[in-house]
């Protein structure tokens, strides 16, 4: 953790089911079996919608946290329940008061919020997320396709959720809309940082993103080139204002990624 800390309140228990930061924290391997159980529960409770993929996913997103809490509580009352300590505290939810950080160290990698980058010469607020999510053809598409999609974002806030026994850092990001993404003839990914989309799904686990770097494209006004660069270690925090040779080690951020021209707005 680094300097400059403020606090923010997370939603009360009545609203916790629609809280994006909390739902992000349940996206762990330990919780995956419960996600599958919850989807089965929804299909049984709403048989008319069992083939409506998007409806089922929306219903899951809005009700899973509260359902998980009651599910885990009921299992804890059983003998030999097998509920781990981590799952127990995750289901109980975090403290309502959450510290906000301007900078955060994760495994030796420094992440900043955009406001912190704006007053420094280094850049640590760019992130990339590869997610298995739904692609919809239009707002009327009731059966979207599930596939891997890449998202480019800029960190706006860093939350550190306290679950009593452990904390989980999450980032609130501005994610670039699909209309602000293009791959040029040289294979470089370009983004228009002013094209913000996915405003209803801004939060992501800090552990799920890769740090990236945006460089102004001098040939195309308003566009930035996305670069992947070696992670800078901050075990010895020196020379924070110096980019050094890291720029010449950057590579075009395209390998192993889907064609951004085919992205549809979620």
Image (cartoon, helix red, strand yellow):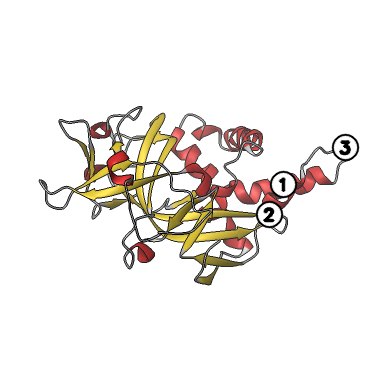
Q: Position of residue 166 (x, y in %)?
A: 68, 54
Q: Do the residues labelled 1 and 2 touch (CB within 8 Å)?
A: yes
Q: Residues within 10 Å of mark 2 (few under 14, many from 20)?
A: few
> Mark 1 and mark 2: span between their CA atoms?
8 Å
The image shows residue 101, relative to residue 185, as above or below, that is below
The residue at 33%/51% (across/down) is: 244
The C terminus, quarter of image: top left
SS type, badge 2: loop
> Which one is in front in this view, the residue at disc 1 or the one at disc 2?
2
Q: From the viewer's perspective, is the residue at label 1 or at label 3 nearer?
A: 1
Residue 143 seen anywhere in this rendered image of the structure: no
Numbered tag placed on residue 86 in the rendering = 1
Mark 3 residue crowding within 10 angstroms, few (<14) / some (14–19) / many (20+): few
**Could you give the CA–CA distance between mark 3 and mark 2, rounded to whole angstroms?**
24 Å
Q: Which of marks 3 and 2 is nearer the N terminus?
A: 3
| Viewer-proximal residue among 225 and 43 | 225
Mark 3 highlights which residue? 80
Give whichever of 143, 184 is nearer the camera. 184
Q: Where is residue 100 in the image (x, y as percent from the top left)?
A: 51, 66
Residue 166, which numbered label? 2
Q: Sequence-wise, which precedes: disc 1 or disc 3? A: 3
| Spot occupied by residue 236 in the image (x, y as percentages of width and height) | 51, 56
Q: Earlier in the sequence, mark 1 or mark 2?
A: 1
In the rendered view, does 176 fall on the left or right side of 165? left
Is any atom of residue 122 visible in this view?
Answer: yes
């Amino acid at each position: 953790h680094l300097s400059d800390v403020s606090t923010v309140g997370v939603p009360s228990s009545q609203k916790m089911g629609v809280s994006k930061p909390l739902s992000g924290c349940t996206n762990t391997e330990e919780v995956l079996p419960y996600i599958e159980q919850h989807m089965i529960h929804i299909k049984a409770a709403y048989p008319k919608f069992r083939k409506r993929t998007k409806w089922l996913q929306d219903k899951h997103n809005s009700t899973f946290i509260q359902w998980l809490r009651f599910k885990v509580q009921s299992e804890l009352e059983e003998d030999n329940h097998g509920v781990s300590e981590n799952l127990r505290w995750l289901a109980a939810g975090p403290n309502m008061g959450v510290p906000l950080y301007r900078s955060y160290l994760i495994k030796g990698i420094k992440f900043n919020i955009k406001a912190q980058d704006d007053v420094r010469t280094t850049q640590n607020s760019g992130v990339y997320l590869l997610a298995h999510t739904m692609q919809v053809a239009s707002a009327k598409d009731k059966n979207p396709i599930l596939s891997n999609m890449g998202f480019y974002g800029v960190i706006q806030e860093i939350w550190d959720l306290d679950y009593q026994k452990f904390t989980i850092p999450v980032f609130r990001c501005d994610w670039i809309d699909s209309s602000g993404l293009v791959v040029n003839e040289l294979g470089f990914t370009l983004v228009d940082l002013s094209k913000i989309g996915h405003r209803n799904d801004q939060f992501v686990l800090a552990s799920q993103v890769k740090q990236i770097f945006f460089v102004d494209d001098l040939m195309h006004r308003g566009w930035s080139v996305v670069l992947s660069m070696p992670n800078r270690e901050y075990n010895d925090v020196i020379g924070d204002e110096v980019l050094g040779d890291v720029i010449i080690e950057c590579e075009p951020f395209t390998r192993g990624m889907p064609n951004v021209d085919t992205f549809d707005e979620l």
